[in-house]
């Protein structure tokens, strides 16, 4: 058998592929293997089957057994459920690659884009038990023999990427490295959604897709998604990596899974006395490198000269110009030496992707999370489902080791969403279910997820102990602020049936974006009015005159424009708000006073509001009689107190403060409405998330 293996080039190439330790090497050897076996990875639907048939090698059988077991799960429906879907995944980090694997198992055509052409991140990830089980099911041990041996529960980012990259390639995923995503190319004619790439002539630029998943990290969040910042008390983290030569002396040094000051005060006091370094905690993992991560006190960093000048602003404090890099290296080196009892011989810093010592300092208390996990864009009748995974969805709090665990959970949740999309469910239902599941993500811990790891699948019910897939309703997805942005993209599109006098809606030569189309519509229907000049979709509407003009265009006997004063913005806005709510059922997005005096009117909020007006008029057959005589309007109730506005029933008031709840600040649960700012815990005052609270029916708290 051994002699046969050594003389079979495909077997040798397979062994090289399994052992390859760089991204380029993996891709090169895989290409050679496919060429030798005469299988085409672009034939994604049958590629895996053909590869197994032609690579009849006993050492590969254990790998096929693992992957076959996963692929035969009922959720994937034999790879038929998403066979017609084409998915573009941005980012070949662990979460992007893990998502791509699930999409491929669902039968989709998957392309992954990665800006870098190498995997160089040395930092080590803590793995939850379910994550270890999941990776074992993908044959991680086959590709990395030391994977979670004994009590080890961690892996370097680079090694994890290599494992997942190999699985992706075997399943027919097309992974393109050294390619930068520059934006979307909207559908035109017979073509669908495509990506604008650098370099411009890259073949992936011709790939048409109906699903886009961003795993590009916190630095890239697609337009339409809103993020919010979560900031706590300043905490400064330092990560550093040292070369691991795998000597006998190095193997004898014990890891530090996590030691905090409150549990070992003597350790930290001795560290301070001997080195002047003052830490809150420190972790040491041994992997491809010797990896340390610690939380340092600002006073200590200033005293040791790491930070040159004290600033209250964290960005200024940790700016590159305010950090002495040599002092930082000494600080990290001394902390690592002391914490390992000076037992690591000949410590030398590993290098990062830029060829510099792999040491970084950052403020980890400033984290961001997306307000919604999904949206749908539509252009010229072609819908695009968009989702977030990884750090661009939720940035992790590293001391808890939640990053990769919640990242994989989000990857599974996203695959479940794409599965529903592939089955043809109404897109509003798909989005509502995704947002229902997203509410659980930040609350997950190893303790409150299911312990039946072998049963985990993309079905949320197999992973979350208490999941309500209908906690967010389709109508909430359409209207509430956190996810309204995906809705009105589909409203501003070319169609001839909107208004007889709106000829440009049907003119296919217009390839402008949806916002520009809406702006042109507003400009057309407010043209000719004195003191009205619509230049944009936010600030031009402050005085209320443009809104009144828009109403007057379609209902010319309702408002006497000549009686309105530009300086009386609150009156004008309230007049328009009252009419639109009473006659068309369009709820105001903010109070008239906020509209008039707010420093910067949110563009997306106004687009949402104006789109609803546009939609209502699109259902009518009225022409635009701008020349109709202006008469005194019928009496309009202009009570400027929002809580007393006519037609406002009690169920449009906040359950807690009894004040009017506007669309953009509304939460609906337990059959009641709340301001987001009012939806807080009765005991501690913390802002609550839907699904993350207990409601007392007796006290109403």
Image: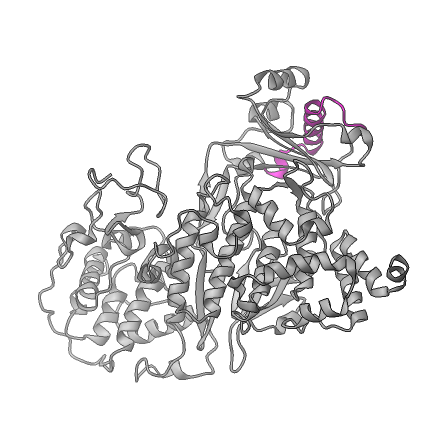
Q: Is residue 465 in view? A: yes
Q: Quadrant of residue 243?
A: top right
Q: Quadrant of residue 295?
A: top right
> Residue 217, percent across and down?
57, 51
Drawn side of residue 470 relative to residue 268, left or right: left
Residue 218 appears in the picture as rendered? no
Q: Is residue 325 above or below residue 642?
A: above
Q: Nearer the viewer, residue 109 or 397?
A: 109
Identity of the residue drawn at 75% across and 35% down: 349
Point 66% across, 60% down: residue = 168
**Region in magenta:** 319-345
Instruction: Report whether 159 appears left or right of 462.
Output: right
Residue in the foreground of this view, choosing between 238 and 135: 135
| Residue 457, x across and y down, in percent | 52, 55
Which quadrant of the figure contains the N terminus? Answer: bottom right
Q: Residue at x 76, y 63 (%)?
A: 30
Q: Position of residue 498 (x, y in %)?
A: 32, 80
Relative to 490, is 248 on the left or the right? right
- Residue 641 vs 232, above or below: the answer is below
Q: Magenta span: helix, strand or loop, mainly?
A: helix
Relative image position of residue 389 (x, y in whole percent): 53, 54
Q: Is residue 673 in the magenta section?
A: no
Q: Which quadrant does the C terminus fall into?
A: top left
Taking the magenta stretch, the answer to whether it contains residue 339 is yes
Question: Foreground: 131 or 235?
Answer: 131
Furthest residue in direction front, as rendered: 1
Check the image and report above or below for 203 versus 572: below
């Amino acid at each position: 058998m051994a002699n046969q293996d050594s003389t079979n080039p495909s077997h040798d190439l397979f062994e090289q592929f399994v052992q390859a330790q760089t991204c380029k090497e993996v891709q090169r050897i895989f290409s050679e293997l496919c060429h030798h076996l005469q299988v085409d990875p672009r034939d994604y639907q049958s590629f895996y089957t053909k590869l197994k048939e032609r690579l009849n090698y006993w050492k590969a059988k254990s790998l096929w057994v693992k992957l076959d077991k996963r692929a035969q799960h009922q959720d994937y429906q034999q790879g038929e459920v998403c066979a017609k879907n084409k998915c573009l995944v941005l980012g070949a980090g662990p979460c992007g690659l893990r998502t791509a694997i699930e999409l491929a198992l669902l039968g989709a055509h998957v392309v992954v884009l990665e800006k870098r052409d190498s995997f160089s991140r040395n930092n080590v990830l803590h793995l939850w038990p379910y994550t270890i089980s999941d990776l074992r099911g993908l044959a991680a041990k086959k590709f990395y023999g030391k994977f979670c041996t004994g009590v080890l529960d961690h892996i370097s980012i680079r090694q994890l990427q290599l494992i997942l990259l190999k699985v992706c390639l075997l399943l027919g995923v097309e992974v393109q490295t050294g390619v930068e995503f520059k934006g979307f190319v909207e559908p035109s004619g017979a073509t669908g959604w495509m990506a604008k790439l650098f370099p411009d002539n890259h073949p992936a630029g011709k790939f048409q897709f109906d699903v886009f998943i961003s795993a590009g990290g916190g630095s890239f969040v697609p337009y339409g998604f809103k993020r919010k910042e979560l900031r706590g008390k300043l905490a400064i983290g330092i990560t550093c990596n040292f070369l691991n030569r795998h000597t006998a002396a190095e193997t004898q040094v014990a890891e530090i899974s996590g030691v905090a000051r409150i549990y070992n005060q003597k350790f930290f006091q001795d560290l301070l006395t001997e080195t002047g370094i003052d830490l809150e905690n420190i972790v040491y993992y041994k992997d491809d490198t010797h990896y340390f991560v610690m939380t340092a006190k600002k006073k200590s960093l200033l005293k040791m000269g790491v930070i040159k000048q004290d600033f209250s602003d964290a960005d200024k404090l940790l700016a590159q110009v305010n950090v002495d890099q040599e002092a930082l290296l000494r600080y990290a080196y001394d902390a690592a030496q002391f914490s390992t009892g000076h037992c690591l011989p000949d410590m030398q810093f590993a290098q990062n992707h830029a060829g510099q010592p792999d040491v970084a300092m950052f403020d980890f208390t400033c984290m961001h999370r997306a307000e919604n996990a999904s949206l749908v864009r539509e252009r010229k009748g072609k819908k695009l489902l968009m989702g977030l995974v990884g750090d661009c969805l939720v940035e992790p709090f590293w001391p808890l080791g939640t990053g990769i665990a919640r990242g994989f959970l989000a990857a599974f949740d996203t695959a479940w969403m794409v599965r529903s999309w592939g089955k043809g469910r109404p897109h509003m239902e798909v989005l509502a279910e995704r947002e229902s599941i997203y509410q659980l993500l930040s609350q997950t811990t190893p303790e409150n997820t299911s312990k039946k790891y072998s049963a985990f699948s993309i079905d949320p019910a197999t992973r979350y102990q208490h999941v309500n897939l209908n906690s967010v309703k389709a109508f909430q997805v359409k209207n509430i602020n956190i996810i309204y942005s995906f809705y009105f993209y589909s409203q501003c599109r070319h169609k001839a049936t909107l208004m007889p006098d709106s000829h440009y809606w049907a003119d296919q030569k217009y390839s402008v974006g949806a916002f520009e189309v809406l702006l042109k519509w507003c400009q057309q229907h407010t043209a000719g009015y004195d003191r009205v000049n619509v230049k944009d979709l936010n600030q031009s509407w402050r005085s209320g005159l443009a809104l009144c003009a828009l109403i007057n265009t379609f209902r010319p006997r309702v408002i006497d424009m000549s009686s309105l004063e530009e300086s009386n913005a609150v009156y004008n806005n309230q007049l328009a708000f009252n009419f639109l709510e009473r006659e068309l059922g369009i709820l105001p997005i903010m109070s008239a006073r906020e509209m008039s005096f707010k420093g910067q009117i949110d563009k997306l909020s106004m687009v949402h509001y104006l789109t609803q007006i546009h939609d209502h008029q699109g259902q009518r057959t009225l022409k635009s009689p701008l020349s109709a005589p202006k008469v005194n309007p019928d009496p309009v109730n202009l009570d400027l107190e929002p809580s007393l506005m006519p037609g406002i029933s009690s169920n449009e008031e906040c359950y807690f403060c009894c004040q009017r709840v506007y669309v953009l600040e509304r939460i609906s649960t337990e059959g009641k409405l709340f301001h987001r700012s009012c939806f807080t815990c009765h005991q501690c005052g913390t802002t609550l998330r839907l699904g993350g609270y207990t409601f007392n029916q007796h006290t109403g708290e």
